[in-house]
Amino acid sequence: MEVSHNMGFWALIGNASFLVQLVMAILLGMSIMSWWYIFRKMFSIRETLQQTDAFEAGFVENASLPVLYENEVKSRHRSASLGRIFVAGFREASKLRKIGRGTLSGTQLEGARRAMRAAYQREMDRLESKLSFLATVGSVSPYIGLFGTVWGIMNSFRGLANVGQATLASVAPGIAEALIATAMGLFAAIPAVVGFNHFVRNLERLSTRFDSFMEELSNRLQGEPDASEEA
């Protein structure tokens, strides 16, 4: 019964060597941080998807680009990622169209596309922020846990040198506390990997929608003479 008491989870952690405890603390910190970023990124991407749906619906229904531009500028603090891409492209196209006296040449249209591409890149950088941390946690945590496990098991076998007769009861606590490090490594890694893959898939879909919108907007900018009006 004494052995059973010493095999309790918290007792094993408390009796682990300092290095193994340090490994556990690092893994716990990484797990907490990854969960924090997972929830933040989940709400951020969900909001972006909803805003993108709303803006696409408004873009299709609104026949006047200058009116849509004015609405987006007025609500820039609530503007969607797609709205900011639209504002960047329309503003640049308006400037270039004035220079060309109402016409928009292929070179000038390319300038508007570059402005949209720059805004697109800023939005993708913002949406992809912290994903590298999740990828790092997912790939590194199991190895950090394995390091703690190897060190703990090594200490356990080293301790057997001072014992006259080796029994399962004498070696089991040391091995068990070492294996907790591996379990904590997997506990930190699995949610980070699942979250990373989920977010990457969502961002790929958003990226495709952004690309399609930029092509559609380019066609409308080239064909609409009223795009030169200032909002």
Image (cartoon, rainbow, N blue to C red):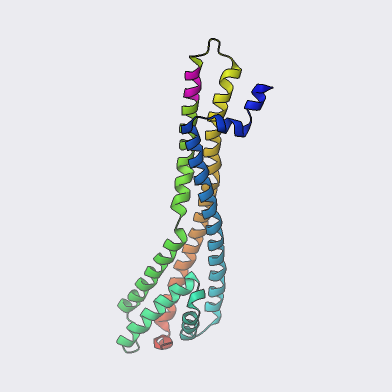
> Quick one: quadrant of the C terminus?
bottom left
**Magenta span: helix, strand or loop, mainly?**
helix
Most extreme residue toward the top is: 164
Image location (x, y in percent) of residue 101 = 32, 89
Q: Is residue 135 above or below residue 124?
A: above
Closer-to-camera residue (57/120) = 120
Q: Is residue 79 above or below residue 41?
A: below
Most extreme residue toward the right is: 1
Question: Does residue 110 show up magenta in the picture?
Answer: no
Image location (x, y in percent) of residue 156 = 51, 22
Q: Is residue 180 above or below residue 125?
A: above
Closer-to-camera residue (108/223) = 108
Q: Quadrant of residue 140?
A: top left
| Residue at the spot 55% in from the left edge and 51% down from the top edge | 35
| Residue at the spot 34% in from the left edge and 85% down from the top edge | 97
Query: Is 210 situated left or right of 51 in this image?
Result: left
Image location (x, y in percent) of residue 109 = 35, 77
Query: Is 32 situated left or right of 92 in this image?
Result: right
| Residue at the spot 40% in from the left edge and 65% down from the top edge | 121
> Quick one: quadrant of the N terminus?
top right
| Residue at the spot 53% in from the left edge and 74% down from the top edge | 55
Q: Which residues are magenta?
A: 153-159
Question: Does residue 156 show up magenta in the picture?
Answer: yes
Image location (x, y in percent) of residue 221 = 41, 80
Q: Is residue 67 above or below residue 81?
A: below
Closer-to-camera residue (110/36) = 36
Total numbered labels placed on residues in the image = 0
